[in-house]
Amino acid sequence: MNTKFHVFSSSTTASHIFSRSRDFVFEPVVASMMENGVNLPTLDRPKFQLPLKPHHLLTDSEQRSREFLSANHTIYLKYLTSVTLDMVMNTYMAKLQHVSADLFPKDGSGWVTIDYHELMRKTIFETSVLTFFGTRLHEIWPDMWEDWKLFNDATFAGVRSNVSWYSRPKARAARERMLQAFDEWVDTEIEEWPETQSIWNDKWGIKMNWEREILGRKFEFTHRGRACLQASFLFVIVTNSAPMATWFTICIFKSPGGVARYREEIASSVKCTDGIGQDEFPLDVLKLKQSQYIQGVWKESLRTGSASAAARVVTKEAEIDGFIVKPGSVLLLPVQLLHFDHDVFPQPQQTDPNRWITNDAKDEEKYRQIQKQNSHLRSFGGGIGLCSGRFVAEQEIINVVSTVLFLFDLEFVKPIEGLDLNPQSIGIMNPKRNPTVRLRRRKLKV
Ligand code: HEM
């Protein structure tokens, strides 16, 4: 059989594919994002491509090139998944305080009607830029929010091919302005990381991108290639988290009794009532994250809001589920097939955080059911491609939305039942039409 694309939909097959990272490789997916998404210069492309010869026949420079991907991935893991994650998230929360003080309706403004999706996208975007890239990017690229939206909205097809850019000249121009801004951002001296600054400074943001910049130079990337490396990180941190903040809020409102229940969890996590713009974040973020109910809403949001399809390329002929797959073929795992499987998620269209919750440790049947559901939840992919930003995403979204509900009464202007999602997306879907909400400051008890 000469099939080029194979679609699989069982969780066991997904685990089988993800666990064989040499036979079913992730590298071409990243290479495609770098080439088509951010137009990586031709000279730098071999660093993302698989060699066409066995490992022992690689020249020294080819071998060194191959090491880049693994070194870059190690930096991601170091900052985004290990003990350093807490420091990254503390920085994120401090930046969120400032961004929300700027973007959210002010005290004493009564009921304010706003485009909620725009507010969430901008909050996540601004906070992420400030956290991960410091203050310089804003100065270099004053129109970054408008350019970013044009760029991001064109990428749902853009990482698979570059055609999207030719049919959207405005998006192509916005991408070029973004890359020029990063050209300037990387065009700076790299000094030692100051001992007085633990993990963040104005110039680099989180130390992670300072380390990635050193890596890019060590592996002799072109100047534009280094700009592309940084821009691609901006892309992965924002593209899915921004729509997820909107969808997570909608899922709270869609869950039976969800708003009251969620507010109870917030009430038990209040540390201080100073509100936003102050030094201390008012909510206990660990407590929020550990709440079973909030976890239930988070997983339901991922389950119902994802439209991604993990992709892997076959390097060695293999048999999967009785089909022979040939080298060069693409394996696709569309997550909606897993997330809406009736046998695993009864009434899959319903938003029900309780399907993830058990209050009885001895209820083995429910426990097994939850385990089965977990193995079907694949919004973050798996194996070597597994999203290293998944913990950041979880914490930032819970914290941003909890802050909104802590500070404001919130009403959707139109019924949320009519709020369809747009499946044209790389991962998490945007709403088809942006929801309008009314917000009013709550009186915080002192
Ligand atoms: C709800 C939000 C997010 C979703 C649904 C999501 C989903 C994904 C998916 C599906 C992949 C490819 C996985 C595969 O094919 O196996 C991926 C890769 C990646 N994501 Fe995310 N992501 C999110 C947020 C983030 C954030 C906030 C960051 C960074 C702080 C991030 C960093 C990355 C990186 C660096 C990769 C490349 C693989 C790696 O080296 O880790 N993502 N993400």
Image: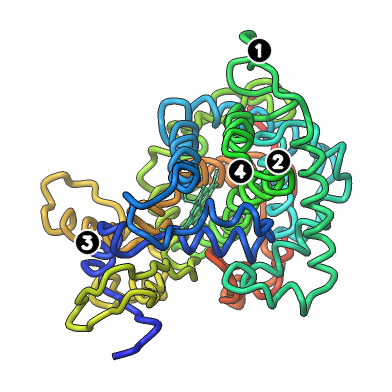
Q: Amino acid at mark 2?
A: Val
Mark 4: which secondary structure? Answer: helix
Which residue is tagged 1?
194
* The residue carrying mark 1 has its beta carbon less than 8 Å from ligand 1: no
Label 1 residue SS: loop
**Quick one: SS at disc 2?**
helix
Quadrant where the image shows the N terminus: bottom left
Question: For residue 174, which numbered disc appears in the image?
Answer: none
Which of 162/171 is in front? Answer: 162
Count residues near mark 1 (Cα–Cα under 10 Å), then give few for <14, some for 14-19, many for 20+: few
| Disc 1 to disc 3: CB gap under 8 Å | no
| SS at badge 3 | helix
Percent position of residue 384, x then y: 36, 51
The answer to whether residue 393 is seen in the rendering is yes
Say what amino acid the circle numbered 3 marks: Lys
Which residue is under mark 3?
Answer: 372
Name which of mark 1 and mark 2 comes first in the sequence.
2
Residue under circle 4?
400
Q: CA distance from mark 1 to mark 4?
A: 30 Å
Of callouts 1 and 3, the N-terminal one: 1
User: Horizontally, is 269 left or right of 33 in the view?
Assistant: left
Residue 306, image x and y in percent?
Answer: 48, 66
